Image (spheres, helix red, strand yellow):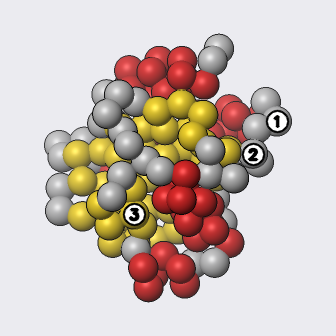
Amino acid sequence: MSWQDYVDKQLMASRCVTKAAIAGHDGNVWAKSEGFEISKDEVAKIVAGFENESLLTSGGVTIAGTRYIYLSGTDHIIRAKLGKVGVHCMKTQQAVVISLYEEPIQPQQAASVVEKLGEYLITCGY
């Protein structure tokens, strides 16, 4: 399965996220949903935020030019929100799965889909 297939057939097809991308820890975007213009620099800052939470608490999470308020996270998960749009990201060994979801999608629905794919990628060595 290609990276684009993971975005299209696993994340977007679930209807639990409205935009999604998979990128490497270096910030290079491997695949993304149509119209999701996330930059290499934005991905790199998200990846750095997994290691240094203070980057996110002070500067928020910027995705596709929009700054979201950091809510919580771990060394593998980042959650953020702005208005009716939420962010759920998961870091794997080599990649980061980034998603946006909008109401009426609930945060736990997006989390479930993103984390399920993330766990699968970890088992595959990614």
Name the spot of residue 70 as percent of width and height, x first.
40, 72
- Tell me how far mark 3 sits from mark 1, CA to CA: 28 Å
For label 1, the crowd category at 10 Å Cα-Cα, with few meaning under 14, some 14 to 19 and many 20 or more, is: few
- Examine the rendered structure and indicate whether residue 122 appears above or below residue 48: above
Q: Earlier in the sequence, mark 1 or mark 2?
A: 2
Q: Residue 43: name its quadrant.
A: bottom right
> Residue at the spot x=36%, y=39% of the render?
36
Q: Earlier in the sequence, mark 2 or mark 3?
A: 3
Name the spot of residue 88 as percent of width and height, x first.
44, 52
Q: Amino acid at mark 1?
A: Gly
What secondary structure is marked by label 2? Answer: loop
> Residue at the spot x=66%, y=39% of the render?
119
- Examine the rendered structure and indicate whether residue 23 appears above or below residue 11: below
Write down the residue under mark 1.
125
For label 2, the crowd category at 10 Å Cα-Cα, with few meaning under 14, some 14 to 19 and many 20 or more, is: few
Name the spot of residue 48 as percent of width and height, x first.
63, 68
Q: Quadrant of the C terminus?
A: top right
Q: Are marks 1 and 2 in contact (CB under 8 Å)?
A: yes
Write down the residue under mark 3.
62
Name the spot of residue 89 as percent of width and height, x first.
50, 52
What secondary structure is marked by label 1? Answer: loop
- Would residue 56 be found to the left or right of residue 74 on screen? left
Q: Earlier in the sequence, mark 3 or mark 1?
A: 3
Residue 94 has which mark?
2
- Would residue 66 be found to the left or right of residue 88 on screen? left
